[in-house]
Amino acid sequence: MRIATINKLCCPFDKADLSLQIITQDIDKNILEGLLTCSQCNRYFPIVKGIPIMSPDEFRESKLEQPLIESWQDHLQGKELKNFRLGATITDNQEA
Ligand SMILES: [Zn+2]
Protein backbone atom coordinates (compact mmCIF):
# COMPACT_ATOMS: atom_id res chain seq x y z
CA MET A 1 0.00 0.00 0.00
CA ARG A 2 1.25 3.46 -0.87
CA ILE A 3 1.94 6.02 1.82
CA ALA A 4 -0.28 8.58 0.07
CA THR A 5 -3.20 6.17 0.29
CA ILE A 6 -2.56 5.37 3.90
CA ASN A 7 -2.42 9.05 4.78
CA LYS A 8 -6.02 9.36 3.59
CA LEU A 9 -7.23 6.74 6.02
CA CYS A 10 -8.89 7.72 9.24
CA CYS A 11 -10.08 5.74 12.20
CA PRO A 12 -13.30 3.88 11.30
CA PHE A 13 -14.62 4.45 14.81
CA ASP A 14 -14.15 8.15 15.41
CA LYS A 15 -12.78 9.44 12.07
CA ALA A 16 -9.68 10.77 13.77
CA ASP A 17 -6.39 10.93 11.91
CA LEU A 18 -4.13 7.93 12.16
CA SER A 19 -0.43 8.04 12.70
CA LEU A 20 1.66 5.62 10.73
CA GLN A 21 4.66 3.67 11.83
CA ILE A 22 6.37 1.89 8.99
CA ILE A 23 7.83 -1.53 9.75
CA THR A 24 8.81 -2.76 6.29
CA GLN A 25 8.66 -1.27 2.81
CA ASP A 26 9.41 -2.62 -0.63
CA ILE A 27 11.85 -0.97 -3.04
CA ASP A 28 9.07 1.30 -4.38
CA LYS A 29 8.45 2.55 -0.83
CA ASN A 30 5.09 0.84 -0.68
CA ILE A 31 4.30 -0.21 2.83
CA LEU A 32 4.24 -3.94 3.42
CA GLU A 33 4.03 -3.95 7.17
CA GLY A 34 3.24 -1.16 9.52
CA LEU A 35 1.12 0.07 12.33
CA LEU A 36 -1.58 2.72 12.24
CA THR A 37 -2.61 4.21 15.55
CA CYS A 38 -5.53 6.46 16.37
CA SER A 39 -4.84 9.43 18.60
CA GLN A 40 -8.48 9.55 19.67
CA CYS A 41 -9.35 6.01 20.79
CA ASN A 42 -5.81 4.59 20.86
CA ARG A 43 -6.79 1.67 18.69
CA TYR A 44 -4.06 0.23 16.55
CA PHE A 45 -4.49 -1.23 13.10
CA PRO A 46 -1.74 -3.44 11.73
CA ILE A 47 -0.81 -3.31 8.07
CA VAL A 48 -0.15 -6.84 6.91
CA LYS A 49 1.16 -7.63 3.43
CA GLY A 50 0.17 -4.12 2.41
CA ILE A 51 -3.39 -4.38 3.72
CA PRO A 52 -4.52 -2.34 6.72
CA ILE A 53 -6.60 -4.45 9.12
CA MET A 54 -9.33 -2.04 10.17
CA SER A 55 -12.13 -4.36 11.21
CA PRO A 56 -14.29 -3.70 14.25
CA ASP A 57 -12.90 -5.18 17.44
CA GLU A 58 -15.37 -8.06 17.46
CA PHE A 59 -14.07 -9.25 14.10
CA ARG A 60 -10.46 -9.12 15.10
CA GLU A 61 -8.53 -11.98 16.62
CA SER A 62 -5.88 -10.81 19.04
CA LYS A 63 -4.46 -14.34 19.02
CA LEU A 64 -3.81 -14.05 15.30
CA GLU A 65 -2.33 -10.58 15.58
CA GLN A 66 -0.18 -11.31 18.59
CA PRO A 67 2.68 -13.15 16.82
CA LEU A 68 2.90 -10.32 14.32
CA ILE A 69 2.96 -7.64 16.99
CA GLU A 70 5.62 -9.59 18.85
CA SER A 71 7.77 -9.78 15.75
CA TRP A 72 7.50 -5.99 15.52
CA GLN A 73 8.59 -5.42 19.11
CA ASP A 74 11.91 -3.94 18.04
CA HIS A 75 10.07 -1.25 16.07
CA LEU A 76 7.56 -0.35 18.72
CA GLN A 77 9.89 1.32 21.21
CA GLY A 78 8.33 -0.44 24.15
CA LYS A 79 4.77 0.49 23.26
CA GLU A 80 2.29 -1.89 24.73
CA LEU A 81 -0.50 -3.18 22.52
CA LYS A 82 -3.47 -4.73 24.23
CA ASN A 83 -7.13 -5.20 23.43
CA PHE A 84 -6.47 -3.54 20.07
CA ARG A 85 -5.45 -0.40 21.94
CA LEU A 86 -2.09 1.22 22.25
CA GLY A 87 -0.40 1.95 25.51
CA ALA A 88 -2.81 1.00 28.24
CA THR A 89 -5.48 -1.45 29.11
CA ILE A 90 -8.94 -0.03 28.73
CA THR A 91 -11.27 -0.02 31.69
CA ASP A 92 -14.91 0.97 31.64
CA ASN A 93 -14.44 4.23 33.51
CA GLN A 94 -11.80 5.37 31.04
CA GLU A 95 -14.26 5.79 28.20
CA ALA A 96 -14.25 9.36 27.00
ZN1 LIG B 1 -10.09 5.96 16.79
Image: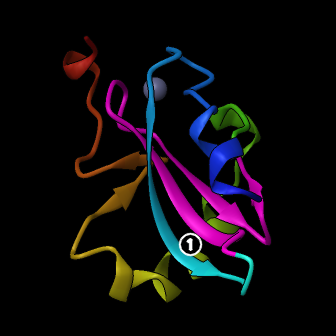
Horizontal arrangement in the rendering, residue 18 relative to residue 63 (left or right): left
Query: For the point 63% across and 23% down, which residue is it?
Result: 12
Compared to residue 22, the image places residue 6 above or below, namely: above
Compared to residue 28, the image places residue 81 above or below, namely: above
Foreground residue among 80 and 61: 80
Mark 1 lies on residue: 66
Q: Give percent across and percent down for residue 39.
A: 32, 32
Query: For the point 51% across and 88% down, which residue is it?
Result: 71
Q: Mark 1 near ligand 1 (CB under 8 Å)?
A: no
**Residue stretch in magenta:** 29-53
SS assignment for the magenta stretch, majority: strand
Horizontal arrangement in the rendering, residue 64 relative to residue 38 (left or right): right
Horizontal arrangement in the rendering, residue 22 relative to residue 46 (left or right): left
Specify whether residue 25 is painted magenta: no
Foreground residue among 58 and 25: 25
Q: Give percent across and percent down for residue 76.
A: 33, 73
The three-letter code of the residue at mark 1 reads: Gln
Q: Which quarter of the rendering shows the N terminus? A: bottom right
Horizontal arrangement in the rendering, residue 8 relative to residue 72 (left or right): right
Q: Give percent across and percent down for residue 96.
A: 25, 11
